[in-house]
Image: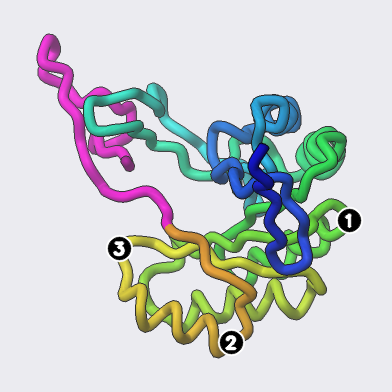
Amino acid sequence: MAILEVNICGMKFANPVMTAAGPGTKDGEKCLAAVRGGAGGIVTHTISLNPANVSRPCMANINSGFMNTELWSVIPKEQWIEKEYKKAKMAKVPLIISMGYSAEQIKEVAPLIKPYADAVEISARYVGSDVTPIVEALKAAKKTLNIPVFMKMSPRTDMQTIARALENAGADGLVMINSSGPCMSIDVNTGYPIMGSKNGYGWL
């Protein structure tokens, strides 16, 4: 049998397949289910200071892939810290905790997730496309944590410039990529968008 083990920043994975930060790891039980299904590591749903307010419907399979209007976790950070991360750790695979978004938010969230994270993923999707706040978000995490910090890139930015700035600022790795969009799918029977967001847009 082929050996699929990989080592990333000192973390040993039985295979290089991981979950993405999203509905597939929306809570601790989903994280465990992913590992039972063969995932070599877990990236948890992104948390921030406050839970997200997500319009419904927020997910759908379409011809070109999977569309969603998920923002970040609808579960409060307190529940993640008190329950969900503990359950996810039971899987005994590397646990990468995703959090966002601004440096100010990360300064508050990072110390809370420190006991559980083997590494972190920083999403800066909602701080814009200017490199400065993205680098500041990275530095806020690096200042608090002594574990690998990966930065999630958005496809709607000047990725080359931002990637170089993050490398120079000490990022341990880059995550490619966040959802693409905005995009829209119309229900031909009703004439309305299938997503429940304010303007009907979703992300692919």
Q: Residue at x 59, y 63 (%)?
A: 122
Which labelled disc corresponds to residue 60?
Answer: none
**Three-letter code for the amino acid on which mark 3 is drawn:** Arg
**Three-letter code for the amino acid on which mark 1 is drawn:** Pro
Give the vertical position of 11 relative to 184 (above or below): below
Q: SS for tag 1?
A: loop
Residue 22 found in image quarter? top right
First in residue order: circle 1 vs circle 3? 1
| Residue that badge 1 annotates | 115
Q: Which residues are magenta?
A: 177-204
| Residue that badge 3 annotates | 156
First in residue order: circle 2 vs circle 1? 1
Question: Is residue 36 covered in magenta?
Answer: no
- Mark 1 neighbour class, 10 Å CA radius: few under 14, some 14 to 19, many 20 or more: few
| Residue that badge 2 annotates | 169
Q: SS for tag 3?
A: loop
Residue 142 found in image quarter? bottom right
Q: CA distance from mark 2 to mark 3?
A: 21 Å
Q: CA distance from mark 2 to mark 1?
A: 24 Å
Give the vertical position of 40 relative to 200 (above or below): below
Residue 138 pos. (x, y %): 61, 75
Name of the residue lying farthest toward the top: 189
Residue 129 pos. (x, y %): 36, 72
Residue 47 pos. (x, y %): 64, 49
